[in-house]
Image (cartoon, grey):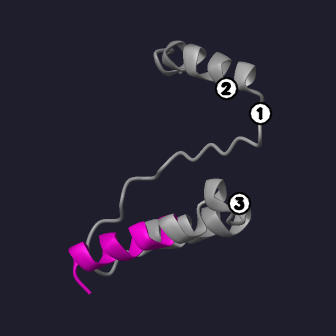
């Protein structure tokens, strides 16, 4: 399996099992970890930070969107 096939398989996994589309959060994170650690074809994909939010009110969603740029610009 070459890099292109591996990437398309990973994308199909994400589309099918993403928590926003009804998939299980624990299964999704474990599956991503297995795809990211699969290294016999080449270097593993960089780790992806996944944040899953439950159902929220429109007010809460807007607050997250407005706050997001400020959170990403902080030095950690």
Mark 1 lies on a secondary structure that is loop
Quadrant housing residue 54: top right
Q: Which residue is mark 1?
A: 56
Residue at image x 29%, y 66%?
Answer: 43
Return the x and y of residue 7 as percentages of the image width and height.
32, 69
Vertical relation: 69 (above or below) 61: above
> What segment is highlighted magenta in the picture?
1-14
Q: Nearer the viewer, residue 28 or 17?
A: 17
Cα gap from disc 2 to disc 1, whole angstroms: 6 Å
Q: Which residue is mark 3?
A: 25
Vertical relation: 47 (above or below) 33: above
Return the x and y of residue 57 as percentages of the image width and height.
77, 28
Residue at image x 35%, y 65%?
Answer: 44
22 in the magenta segment: no
Of tags 2 and 3, the one toward the viewer is: 2
Residue at image x 55%, y 20%?
Answer: 68
The answer to whether residue 9 is left or right of residue 55 is: left
Q: Find out whether the residues at labels 2 and 1 contact each other: C-beta distance under 8 Å.
A: yes
Mark 2 and mark 1 lie on one chain; the one further toward the N terminus is: 1
Of tags 3 and 1, the one toward the viewer is: 1
Mark 2 and mark 3 lie on one chain; the one further toward the N terminus is: 3
11 in the magenta segment: yes
The residue most toward the bottom is 1
Return the x and y of residue 75 as percentages of the image width and height.
49, 16
Cα gap from disc 3 to disc 1, whole angstroms: 17 Å
Mark 2 lies on a secondary structure that is helix
Dot 2 crowding, Cα within 10 Å, few <14, some 14–19, many 20+ = few
Name the disc covering residue 61, or none: 2
Return the x and y of residue 76 as percentages of the image width and height.
53, 21
Cα gap from disc 2 to disc 3, whole angstroms: 20 Å
Mark 3 and mark 1 lie on one chain; the one further toward the N terminus is: 3
């Amino acid at each position: 399996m070459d890099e292109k096939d591996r990437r398309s398989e990973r994308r199909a996994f994400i589309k099918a099992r993403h928590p926003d589309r009804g998939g299980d959060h624990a299964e999704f994170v474990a599956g991503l970890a297995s795809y990211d650690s699969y290294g016999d074809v080449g270097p593993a994909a960089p780790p992806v930070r996944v944040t899953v939010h439950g159902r929220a009110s429109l007010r809460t969603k807007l607050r997250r969107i407005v706050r997001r740029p400020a959170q990403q610009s902080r030095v950690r």
